[in-house]
Image (cartoon, rainbow, N blue to C red):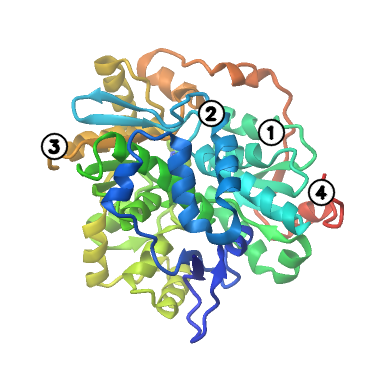
Amino acid sequence: MQYVSTRDGRPRRERLEFEEILLRGLAPDGGLYVPVQWPSLSAVEWRGWRGRPYTEIAAGLVGRFSGSALTAARLDQIVAETYAAFDDERVAPLREFSPGLYLLELFHGPTLAFKDYALQLLGRLLDEVLRRRGSRVTIVGATSGDTGAAAIEAIRGRGTADIFILYPEGRISEIQRRQMTTIAAPNVHALGIRGSFDDCQDLVKAMFADTPFRIAHNLSAVNSINWARIMAQTVYYATAALALGAPDQRVSFVVPTGNFGNVYAAHVARRMGLPIADLVIATNRNDILARFFNDGAMSLGVVTPSLSPSMDIQVASNFERLFYELKDCDANAVADAMARFRNTGAMPVTAAEWRDAKRLFTAYSFDDDATLAEIARTWRASQVMLDPHSAVGVAAARAHRAIAGKAPIVSLATAHPAKFPDAIERAIGVRPKLPPRLADLLERPERLLSLPNSVAAVEDYIRSHARPLREVAA
Ligand SMILES: *Cc1c(COP(=O)(O)O)cnc(C)c1O
């Protein structure tokens, strides 16, 4: 399997192997890596996975993307190790909470959000490849709350990487912050930035664009632009659809969406032949994506803090991968459009491209009041506690069911309710308890750091705190 950058429009564009894009994350031209063609599975192949364990399906799907980077036996081992630490043996259990409506629980990893499903694997894959090469990287990433904790948890204590995570100070929950600032590992750094998540993401992009800095520190990204994350996230769409009768039954998915990574992974699964009926995007009042799919215009607004902070995003980075498809893989047109988007705040999308996009996705948005109402409603009707992100999804699932066909609807529960106890308590008067492994989180000592929204300040910090690259991997 080979990959190209969404912005590499040269006549002889660079084609890279999986191992290389795993290490690079973001392309040097600012583009995102995508496979040259979609691996495709037949109905017989999908059917053969019915009833098989999560790890077996994960190894099967990941193997289609990783090519010769790993032997099948080694991949099986890594995948088994990755999901063994999850606290439910089904890894991503499905539960019917109302007739025809299912919740796909994606909060059984170490940091209680769906990002563990990809990052626990990504951390191990990186470690494997870096050890083999005798090399080290400096990981920098921006987080709107959950990515950072999941990335840190995936990288902590590894000799092959240092990790610096930028988060918007005061805009993530206390639990999310503490999951990052209480990790006492010499290779882990959580940096509070006085700005929004988009500011953090811009800082990361600026560091990647600073070539001498990028080379000096061997920068790597683990945020949702790394292809390996998309790849790992295709797995639970497959296990859920298979459990509900795919490939002989079509299944719809509702995905609480921020950076467009998770729902894009569902799109990839569909491109691989998984019979997905509808793909529904659920956003909070930061609704740039919902406005695009409903009205055809993608124009930047300001980020408004909400009860679902991991979706408080205006620039949905992974949208570029879909945009590349809408442009028929014309990377020059993508590079052009992205430059214009950056300069004007409006994405130039033609009417035809919008119609194509609308055929693939449906979108809804709900504000904080609707989120609280949905938490209360689902609690009363089904005794299921939804975190605010999952509640935005369930609200969209109910709205969609009113107009959709008969396919079962699976709504993704992207975080454990205990990550957002204030919102839950406000909605239902009950404070959710942290699971045993995090029970003492509020008592653990924190290491807090606050930096201005400035590339120079962040680069200085990294320069003075990254371990020298020559230091031998432990
Ligand atoms: C990151 C996150 C999202 C949004 O996922 P994207 O891949 O950015 O669309 C939704 N819910 C939770 C709990 C998250 O952590």
Looking at the image, the residue that sits furthest to the bottom is: 11
Disc number for residue 219: none
Q: Quadrant of residue 176?
A: top right
Disc number for residue 473: 4
Image depth: mark 4 or mark 1 in front: 4
Q: Nearer the viewer, residue 426 or 67?
A: 67
Q: Nearer the viewer, residue 80 or 135?
A: 80
Image depth: mark 4 or mark 3 in front: 4
Is label 2 within 8 A of ligand 1 (CB to nearest ligand atom)?
no
Distance CA(mark 4)–CA(mark 1): 24 Å
Q: In terms of sequence position, does the residue under pointer 3 or pointer 2 come before the other?
A: 2
* SS label for mark 1: helix
Q: Nearer the viewer, residue 61 or 261?
A: 61
Q: Position of residue 449 (x, y in %)?
A: 73, 40
Circle 4/circle 1 CB separation < 8 Å: no
Q: Would you name the residue on which mark 1 appears?
A: 181
